[in-house]
Amino acid sequence: MFDRLFSPFEVGGLSLGNRLTMAPLYLGYAGGEGIVTEALLEHYRLMARSGVALVVVENGSIDHPTASGSKRELRVDTDECVQGLARLAQAIKDEGARAGLQLNHAGRYARVAPEPVAPSTVEAFGRLPRALTAEEMRRIAEQFAECARRVQEAGFDLVELHGGTGYLLAEFISPRTNRRDDIYGGSLENRCRFPLEVMRAVKAAVGDLPVGYRFLAAEWLPDGLELEESCRAAEILETAGPAYLSVMGGTHESYPLPEVIERSERPGYMVDLAAAVKDAVHVPVIAAGRINSGALAEHILAEGRADLIGLARVLWADPEWPSKVREGREDEIVQCDCQDACNKLVAAAKPALCARWPREKLQTWKERVA
């Protein structure tokens, strides 16, 4: 019934057992200084045990606190991090999934940074970031590369660059947040220059290790990046040789808007973005965004709208989603439909819990993340 969904696939020379991936999802399970905790390990064991072929760990900070969006954001910025990261990679691989880790610089959303930095001085939630100098940008590209080497040393199967959600790499591409008048601003080609430099630095650092890219296709803001221009940006980024583009929409500033909230309640609400990007590039594309049924996932693949399916909160709410779909037990799936209770916890700088979990599981996880 789901011949495509459960068929093998390859990204960047890495073989996957099926078309299901876990898209990066920040839950605040790392320790107070971004360390790997037992709760984080157990969370990713469950995600890997689910039956998805690839698990991508959420945004690891390349420079704490300057690049960090939260004190509980996983750190990758020192060699001392490697031991914990190696435990994390092994925990995922021991359950039969491929392991990836996403690297991030939060840019103007770096809430714990004494002074956030960004392409330009565009305010975010009451804080005005400082515009980066060209020398600082070169150093940030080096930090991405250094962190990618740590990801490789820790035993992960791939690294992903976070170019979504309105974070630093996406800020450079966006006409809303990049108002520079040097070679990194103005035309779309110039605005893509820094993400390209980061991608090339990372690929040079890790050799054959696949490098994916989380790609912001639309900001859903009146003056933000729109799909027509982002598809051209995807073509430009493709020249650096990403293993895949994992397509998403929205930023921290658009997520609270009523029309975006309404959009996000629809199954497959970001699939149209992935389909448009797939038409523009030749690398594999991952579609995500409340893909909550096997039929929908299979339909997306059958129509050629994406090559892989990214599950985030859907999988977190019910780690048995893949097996229930495969075994024809979809009526037993615990659906992610709690009106964003988990995001409210994250916004309050607390670890996320799922209101749809059974009471016993909810109590267990309250104790784990306390």
Image (tube, rainbow, N blue to C red):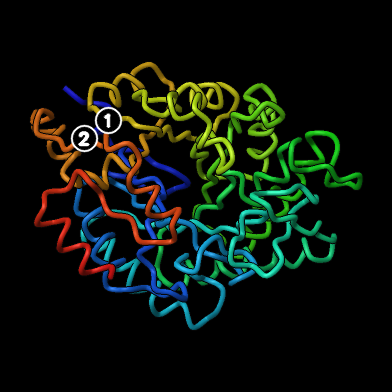
Residue pointed to by mark 1: 292
Q: Secondary structure at mark 1?
A: loop
Comparing marks 2 and 1, which lies closer to the viewer? Answer: 2
In primary-sequence order, the first of circles 2 and 1 is 1
Q: Quadrant of residue 179?
A: top right
Instruction: Pinpoint residue 176: horizontal percent, then vertical percent.
Output: 74, 37
Instruction: Pinpoint residue 358: horizontal percent, then vertical percent.
Output: 11, 49
Q: Is residue 177 above or below residue 4?
A: below
In the image, 75 versus 361, the foreground residue is 361
Query: 10 Å neighbourhood of mark 1: few (<14), some, or many (≥20)?
Result: many
Which residue appears at 35% of the width and 64% of the height?
Answer: 29
Name the image quarter holding the C terminus.
Answer: bottom left
Q: Secondary structure at mark 2?
A: loop
Instruction: Measure the alpha-carbon separation of dots 2 and 1.
Output: 7 Å
Checking the image for residue 335, the label placed there is 2
In the rendered structure, which amino acid carries the disc numbered 1? Asn
